Amino acid sequence: MSLIEYHKTTTKELLALTNKVRYLIKHWGEDGRHKEAVLKNVIKRFLPEKYIIGTGFVIKQNTDSSEHASSRQIDLIIYDNSSPVLFKEGDFVILTPDAVRGIIEVKANIQNQGLTSVLKQANENGNFIFSGKDDKEHLFFNGVFSYEGYGNDFNLDTLQQKYKASNTDFISDPNYHNFLVNHVSLNKDWFIKTWINEAKPHSIYKLDDLSFPFFISNLIDILADKSISENESIWYAANKELNRVRNF
């Protein structure tokens, strides 16, 4: 029995399901939507029942309470099912910030699609939602999940520069550590986690075939209070600190 091999089956399943569609269709927009659906359905299996995962928008009222502002459409939204929903049709939802516990942007290839711009947009979404919350104590998951990109020959210095550039517009906000992107799967092998209150908060890990399950386990960890931390060796079968290649 191997927990590492168990977690690697999540990676294999995600890639197998997305490749099935890629082999059959030529419309890459539809392929992208399918990638979101595949990830959503896999995450759904691990979520506590009090949480729902969908796609849609978050809106909040302006200072003038007769007006409101809207986020961009967010690929995946994790929200508390005890919160009211403004609009719901299937998996599509429109919510207010108080309901949202996490957001995920899903990319086919984050390297090709532009790391800095992808992260910056996710930071903007995180800022929009977090600024509308009354309860700023709960941890907020802001993740970017890429199926491909950044093979083993990429330059870590360049990656670091592009990553830090995505944060530049937000570091003057006193709450920026709470809403910035904090979990990134660059591909099936490379994972980035941001730690709050660290001098060098961003850690890059090389986790062969385990980046995807680490991404999911970190999401569940934020949502599930003590359950993951009390069973850490089960949810994180590999010691990521032994696989850390850089802090910045």
Image (spheres, rainbow, N blue to C red):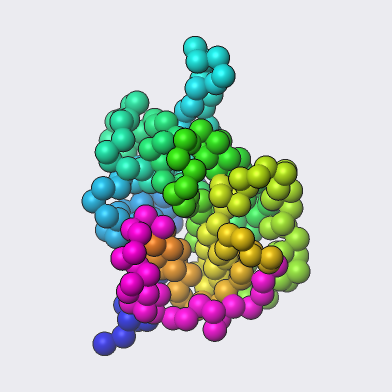
Residue furthest out toward the bottom: 1
**Where 45 falls versus 234 (above or below)?**
above
Nearer-the-camera pick, 175 or 4: 175
Residue found 63% across the figure and 47% down from its top: 176
Q: How many marks?
A: 0
Residue furthest out toward the left: 49
Residue 173 is situated, as x and y percent measured from the top left of the image, at 67, 42
Say which quadrant the C terminus sits in: bottom right
Residue found 50% across the figure and 61% down from its top: 147
Residue found 33% across the figure and 58% down from its top: 224
Say which quadrant the N terminus sits in: bottom left
Residue 97 is situated, as x and y percent measured from the top left of the image, at 45, 35
Residue 121 is situated, as x and y percent measured from the top left of the image, at 61, 43
The answer to whether 102 appears left or right of 182 in the picture is left
Where does the magenta region start and end? 222-248
In magenta stretch: residue 43: no
Nearer-the-camera pick, 126 or 91: 126
Q: Quadrant of residue 83?
A: top left
Residue furthest out toward the top: 66
Residue 187 is situated, as x and y percent measured from the top left of the image, at 53, 66
Whether residue 193 is visible to the viewer of this picture, yes or no, is: yes
Q: Quadrant of residue 19?
A: bottom left
Whether residue 235 is visible to the viewer of this picture, yes or no, is: no
In magenta stretch: residue 224: yes
Residue found 37% across the figure and 70% down from its top: 229
**Where 46 falls versus 33 (above or below)?**
below
